[in-house]
Image (cartoon, coloured by chain):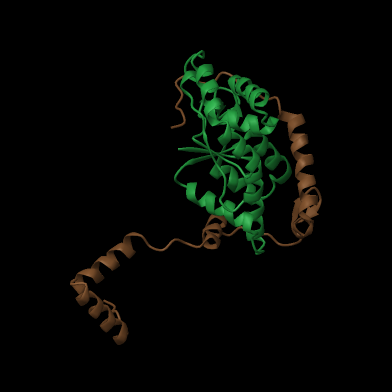
Amino acid sequence: MRVLLDKGFIRRMFEGFARKARRMPLTEEQKAVARLLRKYYGAAELYMSYKSFHTLAYRFGHLEIVQRAFVMIGTLYPTRYARRWARRLRKKFGFGREDALMISMSSFGADKPHKGRLVGADELITLDKRMYERFQNHYDEINFIFRNMITTLEAPFNSVKLPEIEIPPET
Amino acid sequence: METLQIPTQLRENFIDTCRQLQLDANRVLEQFIARFVSQPPKQSIDEWMQNILGDIRLSGNDEFVDGLTVDEYFSMAEEQRDALWEKWEQETDNAVGRMTARKVIMDASFAG
């Protein structure tokens, strides 16, 4: 099983571990994020987007916490079909640019920027309720258009699937 | 081998309850212990996070980000931290936003 963690989740996770390392109490949201992370830790391959990776590495790469996070969590990069699918999600369903890219990378993500494997993700975890609700409300139509699109693609892109989107219960 | 001590009142209540339910008290106790051993209580979320961190510690004066110490960063209002992250994410977008993975290996494995 593969799980993609969105940027809000990654930030709260990182801040939670930093507060823990500083011996500060966690916020309720940070606790909810940690509980969900524990649910999947060791049971699933965890991924963040290449943008989250870049922000953490560039701003916080000197911290041991971040170096440890990079061992725990892999990185997904969008393939060309991720770009195409993200455009459709934006235009047809009104998703924001970042949200559309996260959903599309869940189906068309690769684990390296060059000669990587197409891995995708079974679940996308977000703290963004609007994105979650928009996806649920339009799921049937999204799925219909997605199915029609992938049947026109060559292997392995014609075997991908939509993710399920999960949101921590307390957020 | 260590001898288990069970308070007398608790022991008698347990035996009485088993008798009322027509259960073998020794057998029920054995099942309780077996279940406990196979599914020990989960760690608290604090303990789990501490295990992940191991010996990593941060002090308040450690450099955290952009010239801010750990304590300076966490003493900022949430809105100020939001603004910082939005700025960093915009810079990330400018730097790598258009990156697209090339030459994806075809004998790939898929989600699910």
Quarter of image, res A9: top right
**Quadrant (top left/top right/bottom left/bottom right) for the C terminus of chain B:** top left
Q: Nearer the viewer, residue A106 or A168?
A: A168
Q: Is residue A20 left or right of residue B17?
A: right
Q: Nearer the viewer, residue A87 or A22?
A: A87
Percent of width and height locating residue A147:
50, 21
**Quadrant (top left/top right/bottom left/bottom right) for the N terminus of chain B:** bottom left
Would you place residue A143 above or below residue B62 in this image? above
Do we see residue B11 in this rendering?
yes
Q: Residue at x 61, y 57 (%)?
A: B56
Q: How many numbered discs, if any?
A: 0
Q: Residue at x 67, y 26 (%)?
A: A90
Would you place residue A159 above or below residue B20 in this image? above
Q: Residue at x 21, y 76 (%)?
A: B20
Farthest bottom residue? B8
Percent of width and height locating residue B26:
20, 73
Percent of width and height locating residue B25:
21, 74
Would you place residue B78 above or below residue A114 in this image? below
What color does chain A have in the rendering?
Answer: green
The chain coloured brown carries which letter? B
Quarter of image, res A77: top right
Do we see residue B6 in this rendering?
no
Would you place residue B29 above or below residue A170 in this image? below
Q: Residue at x 48, y 50 (%)?
A: A39
